[in-house]
Image: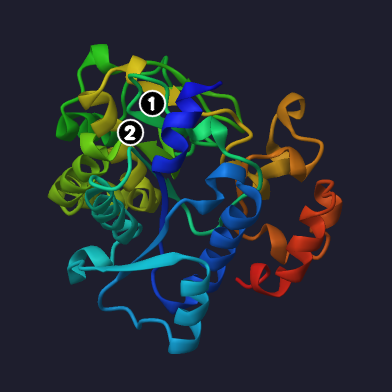
């Protein structure tokens, strides 16, 4: 018997952030995918974190939410943070983590535009592991491991208290570049009691409008878009050891919308092989079935939801 599986499969919560009503149909598809395909994990609690000031779903939608066993958690966020890219997601993650402390040993923090299509046994944390994650897909603003820190990463490392000994190499999943730790925040598995997401939130809110970062945003807007991921990566390596971080396999949180850019030797031959994926605009492509093979029952399940999945 797999004791790790037996002890923890019923102590996992899935949660994601919705900005408001427009995100809820796709969040419900994420929930349906868990309920349908996640095996023993299909009964796990599913939480949608929604800003208090957002328009709440209608009674009709609430009935559907309740039928899926989804719990809606409104949370507060100040106006300054609410208008900043991904700040809502960061705050929502910390609220979810604080609520999960008394209810679960593991929290799976996911993007809304994602699905779980096989039993996610790989998400279970090994003994002594505090975080399971994937590296980013492309280097973009990442820091090449062999090169000196640029002003952005130097500032982030100073803000987060990263020391040279904290740094180790990661390989980006799509373009296969060796970088300093830069973690994809699209799926994170944490132990709620260790408060890694709270640390992320506290650090982010403390620095995201600091004058040195405002200058960097002016020079390169992409820093503003991805500083949330950079802060998560830096705050994590400053607070826990590399041995406490588990890298998830590429079949977890697979970027379906980047399938053609993925290394050929790691590209799944069928969507059905994946454990979970992110899809962004993938299903709005008329030829999505031709990009990667999809077999029953998944192909029929997706076809039934295609009109919602295709919405931008």
| Whether residue 159 is visible | yes
Q: Which mark is residue 233?
A: 2
Question: At numbered mark 2, what does the secondary structure look like: helix, strand or loop?
Answer: helix
Question: At numbered mark 1, what does the secondary structure look like: helix, strand or loop?
Answer: loop
- Which of the two discs, 1 and 2, labels the residue nearer the N terminus? 1
Looking at the rendering, which quadrant does residue 39 occupy? top right
- Looking at the picture, tell me which residue is in the foreground, 68 or 136: 68
Q: Pick the quarter of the image with the C terminus.
A: bottom right
Q: CA distance from mark 1 to mark 2?
A: 6 Å
- Looking at the picture, tell me which residue is in the foreground, 232 or 64: 64
Q: Above or below — where is 235 with respect to 14?
A: above
Question: Percent position (x, y) of residue 302?
Answer: 74, 62
For the view shown, which residue lies furthest in the bottom direction?
59
Q: Name the residue: 64% across, 60% down.
A: 281
Question: Percent position (x, y) of residue 151?
Answer: 26, 33
Looking at the rendering, which quadrant does residue 227 occupy? top left
Q: Is residue 161 left or right of residue 200?
A: left
Q: Name the residue: 57% across, 43% down.
A: 40
Q: Pick the quarter of the image with the N terminus.
A: top right
Question: Percent position (x, y) of residue 257?
Answer: 66, 50
Q: Is residue 107 left or right of residue 236?
A: right
Q: Are marks 1 and 2 in contact (CB under 8 Å)?
A: yes
| Whether residue 180 is visible | no
Q: Which mark is residue 181?
A: 1
């Amino acid at each position: 018997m797999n004791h790790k599986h037996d002890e923890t499969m019923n102590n996992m919560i899935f949660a994601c952030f919705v900005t408001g009503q427009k995100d809820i149909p796709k969040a419900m598809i994420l929930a349906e995918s868990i309920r349908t395909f996640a095996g023993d994990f299909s009964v796990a609690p599913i939480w949608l974190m929604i800003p208090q000031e957002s328009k709440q779903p209608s009674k009709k939608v609430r009935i559907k939410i309740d039928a899926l066993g989804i719990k809606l958690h409104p949370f507060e966020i100040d106006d300054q943070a609410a208008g900043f890219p991904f700040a809502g997601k960061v705050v929502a993650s910390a609220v979810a983590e604080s609520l999960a402390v008394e209810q679960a040993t593991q929290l799976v923090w996911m993007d809304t535009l994602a699905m779980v299509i096989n039993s996610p046994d790989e998400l279970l944390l090994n003994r002594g592991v505090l975080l399971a994650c994937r590296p980013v897909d492309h280097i973009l603003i990442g820091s090449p491991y062999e090169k000196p820190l640029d002003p952005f990463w130097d500032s982030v490392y100073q803000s987060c208290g990263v020391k040279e000994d904290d740094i180790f190499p990661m390989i980006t999943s799509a373009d296969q570049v060796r970088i300093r730790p830069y973690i994809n925040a699209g799926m994170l598995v944490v132990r709620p009691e260790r408060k890694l997401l709270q640390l992320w939130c506290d650090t982010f809110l403390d620095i995201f409008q600091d004058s040195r970062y405002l200058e960097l945003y002016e020079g390169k807007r992409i820093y503003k878009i991805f500083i949330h991921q950079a802060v998560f990566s830096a705050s994590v390596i400053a607070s826990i050891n590399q041995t406490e971080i588990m890298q998830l396999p590429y079949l977890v949180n697979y970027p379906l919308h980047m399938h053609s850019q993925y290394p050929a030797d790691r590209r799944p031959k069928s969507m059905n092989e994946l454990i979970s994926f992110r899809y962004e605009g993938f299903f709005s492509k008329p030829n999505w079935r031709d990009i990667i093979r999809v077999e029953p029952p998944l192909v029929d399940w997706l076809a039934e939801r295609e009109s919602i999945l295709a919405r931008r």
